[in-house]
Amino acid sequence: MDTMSGHITITPGVAGGKPRIAGRRITVQDIVFWHERSAISADEIASEYDLSLADVYAALAYYFDHREEIDKSFAEDDAFVSEMRASTPSRLRAKLVG
């Protein structure tokens, strides 16, 4: 499904079916993470990942239009990471302690 004037697309089976930059595997969630959580500017994201500024701003606009859904995905990802950390012993910690 194409959205946001061709900048954002959703394809089942590609990038987990998450909204992404058309023609790329960079998801809207990636852009939001870099911009909102890592404080990377839109210009820096565009330059680093060979995207147009329109792609970056379309991803951000998509996020603000679908904030609840994408924030839920962030929360699910964070929970998965926490679960994996809790269930997977640290080899480094074992070497340091043992």
Image (cartoon, helix red, strand yellow):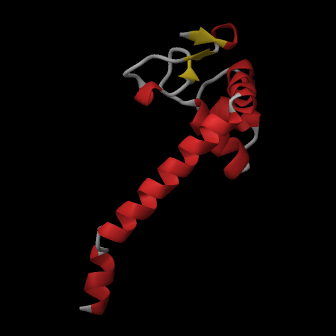
Residue 1 coordinates in the image, percent (x, y): 53, 10
Determine whether 44 is above or below 98 in the image: above
Residue drawn 40% across the image and 22% down it? 14
At which x and y percent is residue 70?
A: 61, 37
| Residue 15 seen in the figure | yes
* 62 w.r.t. 35: above or below: above
Give the residue at x 55% y 24%. 20
Q: Nearer the viewer, residue 49 or 58?
A: 58
Q: Quadrant of residue 19?
A: top right
Q: Nearer the viewer, residue 82 or 60?
A: 82
In the displayed structure, does residue 21 sit left or right of residue 61? left
> Measured along the vertical axis of the image, is residue 98 above or below residue 58?
below
| Quadrant in the picture for residue 86 | bottom left
Count of labels shown?
0
Q: Position of residue 89 (x, y in %)?
A: 29, 73
Left or right: 97 in relation to 44: left
Q: Is residue 31 visible?
A: no
Give percent across and percent down for residue 24. 50, 21
* Front one among 11 and 97: 11
Q: Residue at x 70, y 25 (%)?
A: 62
Q: Quadrant for the C terminus, please.
A: bottom left
Question: What residue appears at the point 63 percent right and 43 percent down from the top-left corner?
Answer: 71
